[in-house]
Amino acid sequence: MDADKKICGLEPDGQYVELAVEVFGLLADATRVRIILALRRGAELSVNHLAEIVGKSPAAVSQHLAKLRMARIVSTRQEGQKVFYKLENEHASQLVSDAIFQAEHSLGGTPRHHHKDRGQA
């Protein structure tokens, strides 16, 4: 079992620690977090649709998507002149969800995600 941890880089001296820090840095932007939330659950959206959802210009969203694409957090599919974006895998979505859940804890009381009948919005 310990061998699995070393292979995955889950040790404090693991080879992926610096890369993980880069991922956190990349996600330390409200627009990028909103983009990831919009793309969760397998959604595939265009720049214009994402711009509407996150309340930013298509040019600004396009710049954020370029960074997320370079980090292999999102991937693209082209259909004619339109480009559609989706999350490359579930990990960025899980990181953002966990960060939102942690933020809920900072408000005090019992966070919504701990309620038995919570809805996954």
Image (cartoon, rainbow, N blue to C red):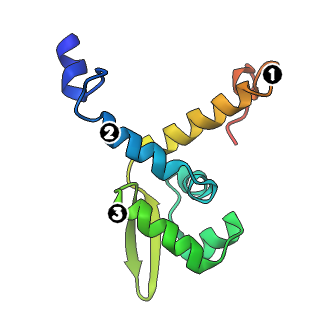
**Disc 3 on helix, strand or loop?**
helix
Q: Evaluate whether residue 23 shows in this view.
A: yes
Residue wearing tag 1: 108
Residue at 38 percent across and 78 percent down: it is 78
Residue at 62 percent across and 59 percent down: it is 31
As displayed, is residue 116 above or below residue 18? Answer: above
Q: Please state which amino acid type lies under the numbered disc 2.
A: Glu
Q: CA distance from mark 3 to mark 1?
A: 37 Å
> Percent x, y for residue 56?
67, 71
Q: Earlier in the sequence, mark 3 or mark 1?
A: 3
Left or right of 42 in this view: 55: right
The numbered dot on residue 98 is none
Residue wearing tag 3: 70
Q: Evaluate whether residue 90 shows in this view.
A: no
Residue at 80 percent across and 21 percent down: it is 108
Q: CA distance from mark 2 to mark 3?
A: 17 Å
Residue wearing tag 2: 18
Q: Please state which amino acid type lies under the numbered disc 1.
A: Gly
Figure quadrant of residue 119: top right
Q: Earlier in the sequence, mark 2 or mark 1?
A: 2
State the residue in front, 42 or 61: 61
Left or right of 29 in this view: 109: right
> Percent x, y for residue 18?
32, 39
Residue at 72 percent across and 24 percent down: it is 105
Mark 3 crowdedness (10 Å alpha carbons): few <14, some 14-19, many ≥20: few
State which quarter of the image contains the C terminus. top right
- Do labels 2 and 1 touch, CB within 8 Å? no
> Percent x, y for residue 87?
44, 55
**Disc 1 on helix, strand or loop?**
loop
- Do labels 2 and 3 touch, CB within 8 Å? no
Q: Please state which amino acid type lies under the numbered disc 3.
A: Met
> Percent x, y for residue 17?
32, 33
